[in-house]
Amino acid sequence: MDPVSSPSSDHAAPGRILVRGVNWLGDAVMSTPALLRLREAHPRARITLLTPAKLADLFQAHPAVDAVLAFAPGDSIWSIAQRLRRAKFELGLILTNSPRSALELWLGQVPRLIGTARGFRNLLLTTAVPPLPETTPMIKRSPREIRARVSNPSGSERFSPPARAHQVYHYLHLAAAVGASPEPVPPFITVSEAQMDSARAQFGLVGSRWFGLNPGAEYGPAKRWPAERFAAVAVAAQRRWNCRWVILGGPGDVAVAEAIARQIVRDLAPAPASAPKCSPLILAGRTSLRELCSVLKVCEVVLTNDTGPMHLAAAVGTPVVVPFGSTSPELTGPGLPGDTRHTLLRVNAPCAPCFRRHCPIDFRCMLEIDTEQVLAALASRLNRPTPTSA
């Protein structure tokens, strides 16, 4: 394997670069700083992104990518490898940690393969990059440890990851092994004015101030602030700011979106704001990924859980307000760490972050974030006085 300290010193600048992208929406957004730095380091190279088909539209007209090579869930390693062989790539940068990703490119006869050092897959890599020293694994706490921390908060060491532990630095570290700068730039997803105009026309996003509400989180309920609190915040905000809410999410979020919309309409009645023209617009399960990008950019602010659309909203330039519970904003917060456009809320729960899908105790990390805190956070994003609760 090549020495990692100077991986490109003995090679001519690659003309055809393949990047094996990641598999989840939030991770894909967090990988864009590395892609932008890669483009900066190799402006004349043709950069192709190999990505799951569900994420392909995310990179439409992206300045870091010349082409997207999409694969479906049922595509075999062999079929993907055959496509790569025909393209004759000179260098492959593997952003995932899986053995399968490395095998795809190895069988695809990509001669130079760069990826994170990880067990036996190192045999497939020409440059195995040691993990970033600040890397902080997201290890689930056991129910026993969670209960011990709650019963003795003062005896529990606080979760305090290094400054460069955020996931964007992991991808930048890999790109640096191909000569790119490791210094961060904000995650970025392209949305044109024409796409925003199309979304406004298609979904009726006109005549109001639009705020986004994203109550789901695919990972599990431990990441979801209670739906009734989303609704309560929406009612108070709509009364004060005369806004209208668009409720977003995937097909699995339709039921909660409809429940929140019903509560908003009920709690606003008999005020004029409860008229149909001011009721929430439910787009959960109705947008493509590219349409979701456009809708998020149309919104003035987005109230969301820690999930893929949170990262997407920040990357298209929309401020987000996020209640954090079982996860860590230091590791996977929106934008770059410390980005003042966004407000990330959490309480001092001794068991958080636990990184679990389900809370084994009393869900205190989320339940202690109240509606007043969230309303104040929205006000700070809008630079307006905090609305009074209903």
Image: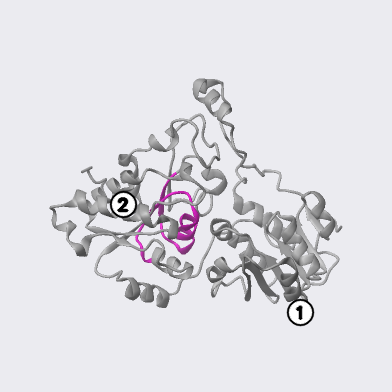
- Give the residue number, with chain letter if any, for mark 2: 259
State the residue in front, 73 or 276.
73
Magenta highlight range:
298-323
Asked if residue 228 lies left or right of residue 169, the reply is: left
> Percent from the top left, x then y, of residue 241?
23, 55
> Percent from the top left, x then y, of residue 112?
81, 66
Q: Callout 1 environment at 10 Å: few (<14), some (14 to 19), or many (20+)? A: few
* Residue 206 position (above or below residue 339): below
* Residue 73 position (above or below residue 358): below
Q: Quadrant of the N terminus?
A: bottom right
**Residue at (55% x, 40% y) in the render:** 355
- Give the residue number, with chain letter if any, for mark 1: 86
Can residue 94 be seen in this snapshot? yes
- Where disc 2 sits, the SS reads helix
Dividing the picture into quadrants, the one containing residue 47 is bottom right
Dividing the picture into quadrants, the one containing residue 83 is bottom right
- Where disc 1 sits, the SS reads helix
**Residue at (31% x, 69% y) in the render:** 205
Asked if residue 264 lies left or right of residue 356, the reply is: left
Asked if the stretch drawn in magenta spans residue 241, the answer is: no
> Percent from the top left, x then y, of residue 84?
74, 74
Q: Amino acid at mark 1?
A: Arg
Can residue 250 be seen in this snapshot? no
> Percent from the top left, x then y, of residue 381?
35, 52
State the residue in front, 338 or 193.
193
Q: Amino acid at mark 2?
A: Ala
**Residue at (49% x, 36% y) in the render:** 359
| Distance between mark 2 and mark 1 Cα atoms | 50 Å
Asked if residue 232 lies left or right of residue 361, the reply is: left
